[in-house]
Amino acid sequence: MISLSDATVVYDNGVKGISSLSLDINPGEFVFIVGSSGSGKSTLIRLLLKEVKLTGGEVFVNDMNLKKIKRSNLPYYRRKMGVVFQDFRLLPNKTVYENVAFALRVTEATTREIKRNVPVVLSMVGLAKKAKAYPNQLSGGEQQRCALARAIVNKPPLLLADEPTGNLDPDTAWEIMGLLEDINLHGTTIVAATHARDIVDGMQKRVVTLKKGRIIRDIDKGGYYDEI
Amino acid sequence: MKFRSIRYYLKEAFKSLIRNRLMSVASILTVASCTMIFIFSYCIAVNLDGILEQIEGTVGLSAIIEDSLDAKEVNALYEELLKIEHISSIGYISKDMALENAHDIFGQEHSDLLDGLAEDNPLPRSFTIALDSNMYQEQVVEKLSKFVGSGFESIQYESEITNILLTVNRGIRIISAVIILAFVLISVVLIMNTIKLTVNMRSVEIGIMKYVGATDWFIRWPFIIEGMIIGVLGAGLPLAVGWLSYNKVLEIISGVTLLSGLNNFKTVQELFWVLIPLSTFSGMLIGSIGSILSMRRYLKV
Ligand SMILES: Nc1ncnc2c1ncn2[C@@H]1O[C@H](COP(=O)(O)OP(=O)(O)O)[C@@H](O)[C@H]1O
Ligand SMILES: [Mg+2]
């Protein structure tokens, strides 16, 4: 599903976001990317979104060579993955329903498809009753549920999450994690960057630990790794 | 592009226009001023062309007859003229009539200048020739020229008024072209700012749209349509004003005695048949160019 070999991202100012990073993620996996602030977690997520340029090495996502994706094909590449962020990134002028529907609209889905799929994902994330609310009328947890609904409404094989619980209180964070686990059980591969120790420890998933842009630990099932 | 997408683009464009109504109105008014000037100068230019035709048609030519010809020969010449196509009427100016005309031109005060001429009148006889239409002028002049040296002394155009009008017409066209160009630039800049404001406010949104997999065109269209709406509304306003006031303006012009002889004005329909599609299309073009220019930067994500 995802394969990086010697992947390096150097920002314009010369700072290395990740360096010589090699990593393989199989379909259906649930992977936490952990590490202290500045270790390169977001850079990895953004690389998979092709939001930052690959400076060196090779990256394959969904069997596509990242380097070979033309600018004009980028939207179609991104439709094969969902993404959620710490700050939710919902469209403020649209209702919950419209925010989710939007991800279908950009694919020129039919009105019927929209009417059929949006309510299904909204009830799946527990937001059916808030369909007509605007983002600023929602709690943080509800906003993240909405963002999750938007991320999965296209049924992408891959879901990326950058600090999805970073702005949420612990109880809500657990609810969101429960949803991610549900989504994963339906077959979606999940890559979640986080530094939420309790959650990583509690979930017992594969954990990849980054430090200064490099992998310093990769275990199949375990908890948060404390650097020494 | 699918119909459901077009509906979505339209909805987004209208929402955005209403959200930034102040800038929208400002842009619409600029396009409106631009179009107004265009309509104004177009109406003047086209009508002036019509008037020129009317005047040129009545002015015609003068064929100066050689002094050596006797009456019989002049008559024979007249017969020849009748054979030429596209001549609508032929008038004969005798020596006495020519002198009388000269008196009219010089007026009472200076008529003493012409006193000596009465006995030995040096003014030539001539034919005044009116044409069916001005477009046959060259053709007719060519035929008349064959008699120059064998009956006619020379062929003269009476084209002074025509020349003045032509110059005026050209002047109006140049001035209006410059003004229109200036206004087009101002319109584009204002629309660019309106759209930029929207795009700016929505740069976060545009980023989100890109994450979700929106193509550049999916993001662009609502803004382009927004610009087009500004352009069309901006063109529609002066078109409506022009259409409604054109006949009133003609009435006023016809009331001015100096111009009362002119009746060759174009009808509203004749003018606006061209103006409506032309202005609307230009408005849309100006609007979309403004939009596309203002968005270039934001789409590079
Ligand atoms: N846009 C950027 N321009 C320059 N340097 C950046 C940029 N984004 C991140 N970095 C740098 O790249 C490194 C990795 O950052 P990041 O991937 O955001 O880490 P994390 O998400 O783990 O906190 C840091 O040193 C950071 O300063
Ligand atoms: Mg980060």
Image (spheres, rainbow, N blue to C red):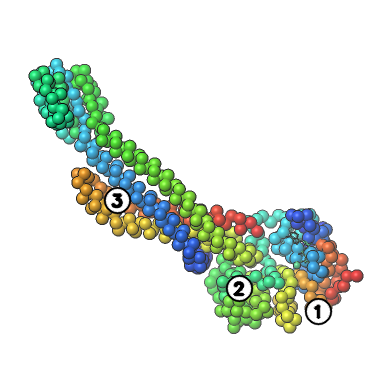
**The C terminus of chain A: image quadrant:** bottom right
Element under label 3? helix
- The residue positioned 42% from the left and 47% from the top of the image is B179
Residue A196 vertical placement versus B182 (above, below):
below
The numbered dot on residue A198 is 1
* Residue position for label 3: B270
Q: Residue A146: which quarter of the image? A: bottom right
Q: Residue B54: which quarter of the image? A: top left
Query: Is ligand 1 less than 8 Å from the beta carbon at label 1?
Result: no
> How far apart are the two marked residues, 1 and 3, measured between alpha carbons?
80 Å
**1 vs 2, front mark:** 1
- The residue positioned 43% from the left and 55% from the top of the image is B31
Subunit bearing disc 2: A
The disc labelled 1 sits on which kind of residue?
Asp
Task: Say whether marks 3 and 2 touch (CB < 8 Å).
Answer: no
Residue A148 in view of the camera: yes
Q: In this view, does B35 lie to the left or right of A84?
A: left
> How far apart are the two marked residues, 1 and 2, measured between alpha carbons?
30 Å
> How far apart are the two marked residues, 3 and 2, measured between alpha carbons?
52 Å
